[in-house]
Image (cartoon, grey):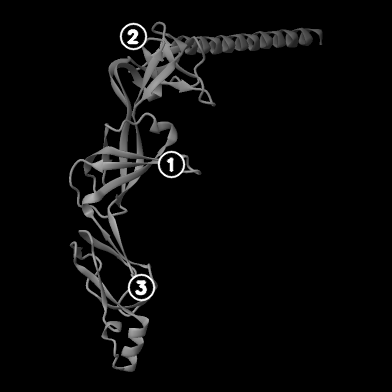
Amino acid sequence: MKFETITMSRIYKKLLVLLLFFVIYSCGNNQQTTQETQISGTPVRIIHPQKMDLSEHIQLNANTIFLKKEVIRSTFQGFIRRMYKNIGDNVKNGDVILSLITKEAAAFDSLASDLSEKNLSRPVKISAHSNGVLTLLNFHEGDFVSEGEEIAVISNPSSLYFSLNVPYAAVAKISRQKNCTIFLPDGKKVMAKIHNIIPSVDPVSQTQTVLLQPTQQLNLPENLNVSARLDLDTQKDAVVVPRSAVLSNETQDKFWVMKLLNDSTALQINVQKGLEGDSLIQIMQPVLSVNDAIIIQGGYGLPDSARVNITE
């Protein structure tokens, strides 16, 4: 019994030594793997800042309008005897649009009575006083109209403008002499210039209406939705980086880039942004060199003085 007890004790000791060996070996492998990961670092891609001319712009929806319109109104209360023009017809100054008769004349006509005063039944013709196209017709022959009621509208296609609502904060940056680009629904681009800024702000959206005049004669319908791009500012030889290189906090009041100190260490550098283009951002402060290495991919969430691994 004593011999068996000594044998079992030796076996347990050997098993304990083996178990301890495996634990130490596993910890060593884990530590080695951790050290290898720390040495390799987070894989990142880098770029170098560039110097170029950068323009900041806004792109807003706009619509076509005709500024010159003539509203045809009834001169007295009565009935429309005849319409001489239809919607879409070209109209010249002096063309007769419609004729009106009084209620009394219409009543006598319905009774087939012979009036002693012929002037009472004579229709009154209403003519256009401008050139254009008949774009609106609210009544037809036989309809009753009140005095001063709007019957038709004549629009002048040569008075085509683009109307858009610009945020008030951006209006101060817009120059009246600057050109802008209009993108039509069919993919075509036309140029326009700022014609006028209406001195009134929408109380809800806090925007001002800006009228853009096309630089060429266009044959477009009214109320066509288009897109207008207006340049706000231009900076010569700006130091720029891609948008993906500039990181920020949740409140968007602090910005930084991850700049490489050497081949394996990246530092967090706080920056002051300047103009912003479609894909590029100007860095005002600090002054970056075109030889600096800035992380463009893989930098999100990295702490200051992070270990990184540059990939192609």
Whole-number angstrom distance, CA of label 3 to CA of label 2: 78 Å
Residue found at x 42% / y 6% = 261
Q: Amino acid at mark 3?
A: Phe
Q: Residue furthest front?
A: 116
Whole-number angstrom distance, CA of label 2 to CA of label 1: 45 Å
Local secondary structure at mark 2: loop
203 left or right of 214 in image: right
Nearest the camera: 69 or 190? 69
Q: Amino acid at mark 1?
A: Ser
Exactly how many numbered labels are in the figure?
Answer: 3
Q: Residue furthest right?
A: 1
Q: Quadrant of the C terminus?
A: top left
On residue 200, which mark appears? 1
Find residue 218 and report its horizontal and vertical position in percent: 20, 48
Contact? badges 3 and 2 (CB < 8 Å) = no
Q: Amino acid at mark 2?
A: Ser
Mark 3 and mark 2 lie on one chain; the one further toward the N terminus is 3
Q: Is residue 185 something that shows in the picture?
A: no
Local secondary structure at mark 3: loop
**On the image, numbered disc 3 is attached to which residue?**
76
**On the image, numbered disc 2 is attached to which residue?**
289
12 left or right of 30 in image: right
Q: Is residue 222 above or below residue 294?
A: below
Find residue 57 and report its horizontal and vertical position in percent: 34, 31
Nearest the camera: 234 or 292? 234
Find residue 54 and report its horizontal and vertical position in percent: 30, 23
Based on the displayed image, in which of its 4 quarters is residue 199 positioned? Answer: top left
Residue found at x 36% / y 84% = 104
On residue 113, which mark appears? none
Nearest the camera: 262 or 216? 216
Local secondary structure at mark 1: strand
Mark 2 and mark 1 lie on one chain; the one further toward the N terminus is 1
